[in-house]
Amino acid sequence: MGALQSTDIERKDVIVSRNPATREVLGEVPDQGAAEVKAAVARARAAQKEWGELPVKERCERMRRFRDVLIHRAPELIDLLVRECGKTRTEALSMDVMTTIDLATYFIKRGPKILAPHSISLHLLKTRGSYLHYVPRGVVGIISPWNFPFAIPMGEAMMALITGSAVVNKPSEITPLIALKTKSLWDATGLPPDLFQVVTGRGATGAALIDSGVDFIHFTGSTAVGKKVAAACGERLIPNVVELGGKAPAVVCADADVDRTAKALVWGAFANQGQVCISVERVYAHQSVHDELVEKVVALTQKLRQGDPSTAGDFDTGTMTWDHQVEIVEERIKTAVSQGAQVRTGGKRAGTGLAFSPTVLTECRHDMDVMKKEIFGPVMPIMKVRDEEEAVRLANDSHLGLAAYVFTGDRQKGKRLAERIEAGTVMVNDCLLAYGAPEVPFGGLKQSGIGHTHSDQGLRDLCQTRHVNYDRLAFKREMWWYPYSDKMYKRTLGLMKWLFR
Ligand code: NDP
């Protein structure tokens, strides 16, 4: 690491990782091809055999070793997250590392209970018993994005490993070093190295992973790539979860505590430089609080301290991670302004590297691109609405449905509005946080995805669910067996009428 100069020409067979704040080269990784991916999956499959046969409790105990290494060596991870992503130290700790350690702790503790066989009493067939049991899938492929390059693959990896599968992760080409660092921490635990592997590369490496014979794919990324991934999985009948883009609306009611709402929105829109699938991406503010809200949001935004987070100092916000994403943000703002939006603060790059000033746009209309298309950057567009009905209608007028927020002084009303919003997760009077609760399912509606991660059910979904049906009472013969007869028909008809009378 560090031997390359930033002037090096990008080669096709390697991927160069740079610090987005300084553009300094941090390292390079190979762009691995299909043969290497296949070999990794074959090694993972071999390692999984013994791992999958261990009792869940034993696997959980062993996974605790990995969790403990992560706790002890968290500062190394955080340092690299800051340098490779441009995120602040506090966000690297709280949003990437701590959430993952909490998730691991939850599933290590609860895993044996969640994955215990589950009996189902049959309402009609009283002579038979049924139960479900959960069997490891085999090899789980995880294809992950660059915005939370530790939390996203590792949350899913922890869960899959606890279920007894092996994991092969294809991280984003923008942040491959975090994944390799995580792999080195895994290897330091003494657990079988092949059980958790990382293959580095571009999109083709992800496609090769789907084609390598894996038993399950967990994809997190854009809706455009997610559709390709779901189609590729469909062709091969590989079960999959796709967690895709978002365009989270925030509905601000007339009775909202404007001061608290402004603080929540500023955090919800600008944390991780707005590169969060559940970032506040559009605000619908009731006309009676709109002006006061805008004033407070702008004042708070202007107070945010921005800088290179890898240098000493207290920063609230760092830099964006990927130059292409900065260009998307610039394009969204330019188009919005040409359509009549006003930049109340920000709107431009900030200093060196990929820093972009937190931006507040007002005079937004629902038909603008900035209110419809994912931004994935530090931009908060605000629109004035007549009433809450209009806000809910516009919130639902989207092809995406990942997360949404409602701000109100009336908790019951908040819940009622939340239930009417078409999103996988709706929070009342806060933002973002729900992703960090491992016990609740996280997933999108509409084009924001299919399936869930997290939650007890999410853990079971990472397994094959198998059903066993057995005899509780056995007679010499059962009444539904051969031979059929008119007498049997009439008796069954009578029975049906009596049962469903
Ligand atoms: P992309 O969809 O561009 O990439 C995601 C991953 O897929 C990367 O590892 C990428 O590799 C890989 N990939 C690209 N092409 C293919 C292919 N044909 N087959 C298989 N894999 C492929 O997303 P980003 O990394 O840009 O992440 C940002 C997006 O992720 C945003 O839309 C955001 O909303 C969404 N997201 C969703 C979350 C959720 O939980 N719903 C959470 C976080 C982000 P490479 O990078 O090397 O091209």
Image (tube, rainbow, N blue to C red):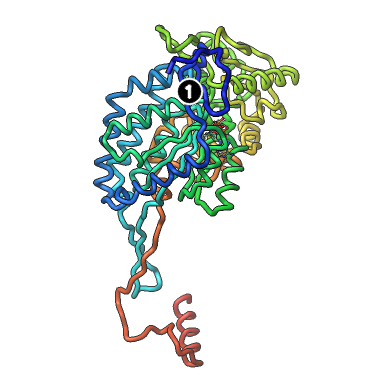
For the residue pair 178 and 501, the one nearer the viewer reads as 178
Q: Residue 427: x and y, percent?
A: 48, 33
Q: Is residue 239 above or below residue 2?
A: below
> Position of 239 compared to 335: left or right?
left
| Location of mark 1 (residue) | 28
* Number of numbered discs on residues: 1
Q: Amino acid at mark 1?
A: Glu
Q: Residue 188: x and y, percent?
A: 29, 31
For the residue pair 400 and 311, the one nearer the viewer reads as 311
> Position of 169 compared to 345: left or right?
left
Q: Residue 322: x and y, percent?
A: 56, 21
For the residue pair 165 and 242, the one nearer the viewer reads as 165
Q: Is residue 353 above or below residue 489?
A: above
> Position of 498 compared to 274: left or right?
left
Q: Helix, strand, or loop for circle 1?
A: strand
* Residue drawn 43% across the image and 45% down it: 41
| Quadrant hosting ligand 1 | top right
Mark 1 vs ligand 1: CB below 8 Å: no
Q: Residue 449: x and y, percent?
A: 55, 42
For the residue pair 450 and 137, the one nearer the viewer reads as 137
